[in-house]
Amino acid sequence: MTNRSSFVPGEQVTVLDGTFAGMQGRIRDPVPQDGLVPVEIVIFGRSISLRFDAWPVRGDPMNEAAWLASCSSAKMLSCLRGLEPRLVDLDRPLSHRQGRLLACACLRLVEPLLVEAGVQEILPLIETHADGQPGQPRLLEASREKVVGLLGDGHWTARYAIGEVPARHHLGIALLSALDPQENGWLAPPRVVELLPPEQRGLPALLLRDVIGNPFRGPPAIDPAWLTWNAGFIAQFARTIYQERRFDDLPILGDALEEAGCADRDILDHCRADRLHVRGCWVMDLIRSVD
């Protein structure tokens, strides 16, 4: 995934993923190859040059307008992680649960590849575990071994973004990032971008906004009275939407919220917007947190 068509030799950049994520280095060769750029970094006083997915350190800081318009999930995630310059501290950082659900939502965009690789059953396991339901550690570990097998001998190469990265490696690293609670799913959206056709590469950014909303503002408040309106219809309907993945019904939920007394435009507009909604949707999470 290339964030620029070219760089300037010696330009300072931040490595976006892999074991060196967050480290700063300098561009050695200004022309990206296979979506990666040669970056020189210093480790324990020794200079080495490897190919990474990188983003310039200098440039316009991320602000609210840039967040709402961005098509780059990599840059948005860097902002959340503090790797990208931003104008203010964020009110809504991405939690471990949200990161893993976002990773699963992105991976569902390439479901035919999951089926082809025989790993489509892994996503429901990750989602169940992320939502704090009784886990199945043996199944999760078996899933991890299956994904490592998918990567094969190229596991190290794919994980640390050195050299050419085949499609199955992007898929495998995205799955491993979602499987590991410590990794928080950070690596999945940029990896999935590489598997999507050019006209769909902005979709992970849309999914990130569905999950985190606008991190430059605090979340709206949910009035508990809305959830008791009409014999508790809103709370019950929200549970059904979430459990059965009936996200196309969110406009109906928005109408019900308005009838119950909600006048918050961020909530109502989000419910009624013609857009992708997924598990982890910030409005659904607000309702479920009060329910």
Image (cartoon, helix red, strand yellow):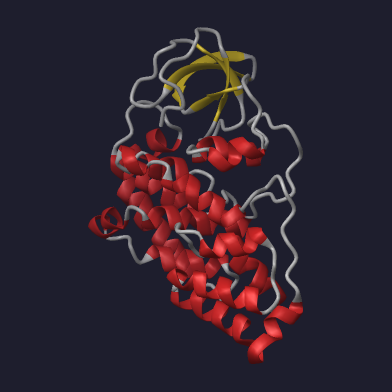
User: Which of these two is toward me, 196 or 145?
Assistant: 196
Asked if 232 appears above or below 91 in the picture, the reply is below
Find the residue positioned furthest to the bottom: 231
Percent x, y of residue 21: 57, 33
Q: Could you tell me how many numbered marks the image carries?
A: 0
User: Which of these two is toward me, 204 or 115?
Assistant: 204
Is 80 displayed left or right of 167 in the figure? right
Percent x, y of residue 231: 65, 92
Is 234 displayed left or right of 27 in the figure? right
Asked if 116 appears above or below 238 in the picture, the reply is above
At 46% from the left and 73% from the top, the residue drawn is 249
At 70% from the left and 86% from the top, the residue drawn is 228
Q: Quadrant of the image for the N terminus? A: top left
Percent x, y of residue 260: 67, 79
Q: Is residue 281 visible?
A: no
At 63% from the left and 19% from the top, the residue drawn is 58
Q: Quadrant of the image for the C terminus? A: bottom right
Asked if 169 appears above or below 85 in the picture, the reply is below
Find the residue positioned furthest to the top: 9
Q: Quadrant of residue 146?
A: bottom left
Is 245 displayed left or right of 238 in the figure? left
Q: Is residue 69 visible?
A: yes
At 65% from the left and 55% from the top, the residue drawn is 95
Percent x, y of residue 83: 64, 32
Q: Quadrant of residue 226?
A: bottom right
Find the residue positioned furthest to the left: 116
